[in-house]
Amino acid sequence: MSERSDITLTINGRAHAIRVEPRRTLVDAIREDCGQTGTHIGCEHGVCGACTVLVDGEPVRSCLMLAVQADGREIRTVEGLAIGDELNPLQRAFMEHHGLQCGFCTPGFLMLVTGVLEREPDISDDDLVDVLSSNLCRCTGYQNIVKAVRAAAAQMRR
Amino acid sequence: MNAPTKDSGLAWVGRAIRRVEDPALLAGHGRFTADLPAALRVRFVRSPVAAGRIERIAIPEGANVVTAADLAALKPIMPALHKFGYVPIAQPVLASGCVRFVGEPIAAAVAASEAQAEDIADAVSVDIAASAAVIDAGAALADGAPLVHAQAAGNLVVEGKVETAGFAAAQGAAHRLIAIELRSRRQNATPLEARAGHAAFDPVSGRVTLTCATQMPHLLRTAIADLIGMPEGELRVVAPDVGGGFGQKMSLVPEYVVLVWLARKLKSSVAWTEDRRENLIASFHSRDQSVRLQGAFAADAKLLALSAEVVANVGAYSCYPTTCAVEPLMAMAELPGPYDVRAYACVARGVLTNTCPMAPYRGVSRPVITTALERLMDAAAAEFGMEPVEIRRRNLIEKFPYTSVTGLIFDAGSYQQTLEIASAAIDVPAFRRRQQQARSQRRYLGIGFAAFSERTGYGTPAFAARGMGVTLGWETVELAMDPSGWVEVRIGASPHGQGLRTTIAQLVADELGLAPDRIKVVHGDTDRTPYGWGTFASRSLVIAGGASVLAARKVRAKLKKIASHLMEAAADDIVLTDGVARVAGTDRALPIETLARAAYHQVHLFKGEIDPAICETATYDPPGTFSNACHACIVEVDPETGRVTIARFVVAEDAGRLVNPMIVDGQIVGGVAQGIGNALLEEIVYDEGGNILTATLADFLPPTSREMPPIELLHLETLDGTTITQAKGLGEGGAIGAPAAVLNAINDALAPFGVTIEEMPATPRRIRAALRQATKKPR
């Protein structure tokens, strides 16, 4: 287990040269080796989606990907969403519509939705509910997350 | 009295302002326990068997592994309850001698990284001579069952009994006796952040700071210091951002005790982050109760007498501080719910088994007893040939204050009105027509109601009545204004998603005539806040909010006195508003920051009549109040697959004044989601040997956005002055009412088949099993 690989994770445009064991998951590398703790770990078996990040634009469960698999690829995390000190329209919509309570699942939802809306800006309301069912939230009952995402999608289309 | 108070005369209370908590959480700047760096990581070795004697623990050469032998000087966890024959149960911090459930911590492996700690933990070999385990409460109560703890004969850890005078006569006078038996299976509260702890030794002060995902930092500090035998002043407990709790984080966690002990011993920082499998098998469980009810009804469908038998499987140990008796005893006290019944008998038992210990979970037994009582009401309505709404109308309390048959005092509420507005919103006559039409197309729709009360915001009198070793209840708030006129509100409550930093700022803003953004609420740090009990039982806004208002009123009085000196006016003539102190009826005014600065820097102006600085403390210890609500839901059941689809869900609720309606709605919808999970999806399943078969979130199923119907919310606001803020708690109501409404609706849908489902979750498998027994062909 001790042979380590030198890899580069590019997170939100910044390159992190790190040395990891092959078994290191991407989420552990992002959090522990690159110090980006905005991405959370909820289940470590790919169900809850709290660890969702974008890898080359696609939402990925970073607990199910190895860090070495992400070598050289573009990773985006919650820390990269805000524009300077300003929350982006999706983040603002979550605030406006009370789409978070404890906030633990929120980074995963934000990254899931960012990836989906970039790929499919005209996604139907029903498909959106299906996509959001990828991730778990225990506080909100989802109603306000759905509202927030619909509002953000509408704003982004304008 | 019940109309929403659009014009409350308050500038900030009642407004859906955005939460101050949100920007950091949305930007990825939340600070959760697992985000802290630590020199050392801990992995716990857990029991793979449900019962047995530990014969040998083999530790790999050179590995740092701690076992019970190392912790011999620590006291075991032993919560106290002085009532109902409660048998004190001791839980060693690490299993000592024997193991009593799968997942019980046996040893702690310590290493520089999580991966290394896991490798070491995997290499620790524990020989256990397995013995017979009891998993099911019924089996545990059977004659000759193996004992989980030798001192608890028959595995009975607590037994509450009550029978009112004249009960038998009241029951005997009944026109109809109707019985129901309900089973609510075992759940896990499943906060998205599992448990996590980080203990760091400070070589300068010799103190340890335990940062952890807890709902009760102060009580945790006391409990851990007691067990370790260290001065409490040497321990600081911090609850940083906490990713949900729902009760699972309001009990003493043995693993945290080990972390503090390790930090002191190794003079280092040690951290443990629970994984989801550990959380599902070894963090606290909930529910797992059976309720048998018998209602004695008069000819006019009035409930004359109610008898109940409650059996709660409490697992292998007793949680601190509430003890494992909290579930059965709350069931006994609150079972009659919001119905006017004057004769009552109940036996409520807590039964030990070789399963994960129980702790409170949102609603604490009330989701189960409400479902049982509401099933009884629907069963009776069917017998009497009346609508479910009508039987509730005839039995709900309507005169206040109402003293219940168990001695609880219900303050004013809107039990009848919430029933009426919920049933009007869901339009029962129109639904019945649709239901008939659907049946002719072999589609099965059902409607279900749940009328209930939610006891909230209770202080020491209510807890003292329970007889616990620790009498919880009051909250103290310290409110300071600094020389720049900014306000810090230090609270002992410990929110973790409830938005209390926003709502308490709204309450204080109105008292001081300031904008909420000038008011910072500090919580979750025993070094920074007055001793308090934390956040649970729908209490924080009522009690910590009430204490905040009381402290703010003291500050307001002081500011007026200062203004009276500086402006040479009577203090009574000073009005604080919009950040300014004005002399009423004049144009004389001073900004509040000028008063604040004077309180520190110009004290000589006050001629010794006003003490320097602005810092006031207040305590609130209320008797308690009741929120109320009625849930109404419409489902469709597919008889071929057993699938349940919720078509509509209406909540009519009354929690007094809505301090922030946006946050109120969020609490209700979130609670309903958990209630729907209880009704349809969530179940921890043990096999006969005590192994958990549902140890992932692909097996234990919290609802997703796909299972959630839109929740329609209706609000009433009964303002009767029972609490200082006129607000009542509402954190649990959604979870209390929803299971009953859903289960009643399913049973209404299944009525044409002549079968009922009296078990939750009502999974497709259970519904299909019931339908296979159907004696009736649907019309």
Image (spheres, coloured by chain):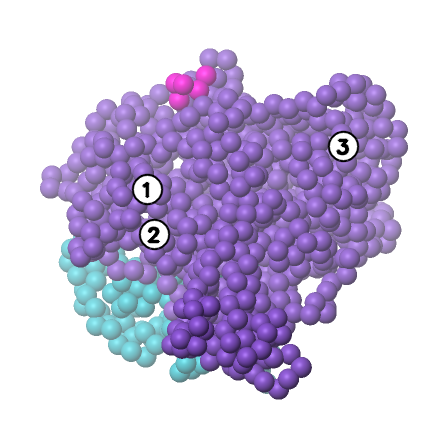
Q: Residue B6 appears in which quarter of the rendering? A: bottom right
Image side of residue B535 versus residue B197, left or right: right
Q: Is residue B358 visible?
A: no
Report helix, strand or loop for mark 3. Answer: loop
Choose between B330 and B369: the one closer to the eye: B330
Which region shows up in magenta? B149-153
Q: Residue at x 32, y 79 (%)?
A: A13
Inter-mark Cα distance, 1 to 2: 10 Å
Report helix, strand or loop for mark 2. Answer: strand
Name the residue beneath numbered marker 1.
B224
Inter-mark Cα distance, 3 to 2: 46 Å
Inter-mark Cα distance, 3 to 1: 44 Å
Q: Check the residue under mark 1 and report the chain it is in.
A: B
Please tell me whether residue B652 is drawn above or below residue A77 in the rendered image: above
**Same-subunit check for callouts 3 and 2:** yes
Residue B499 is inside the magenta segment = no
User: Mark 3 or mark 1: which comes first in sequence?
Assistant: 1
**Chain that is cyan in the image:** A
Report helix, strand or loop for mark 1. Answer: helix
Q: Residues within 10 Å of mark 2 (few under 14, many from 20)?
A: many
Residue B151 is inside the magenta segment = yes
Choose between B406 and A130: the one closer to the eye: B406
Name the residue beneath numbered marker 2.
B237
Label disc, if present, on residue B341 of the rendered structure? 3
Q: Residue furthest front?
A: B607
Q: Residues within 10 Å of mark 1 (few under 14, many from 20)?
A: many
Choose between B745 and B718: the one closer to the eye: B718
Identify residue type, mark 3: Val
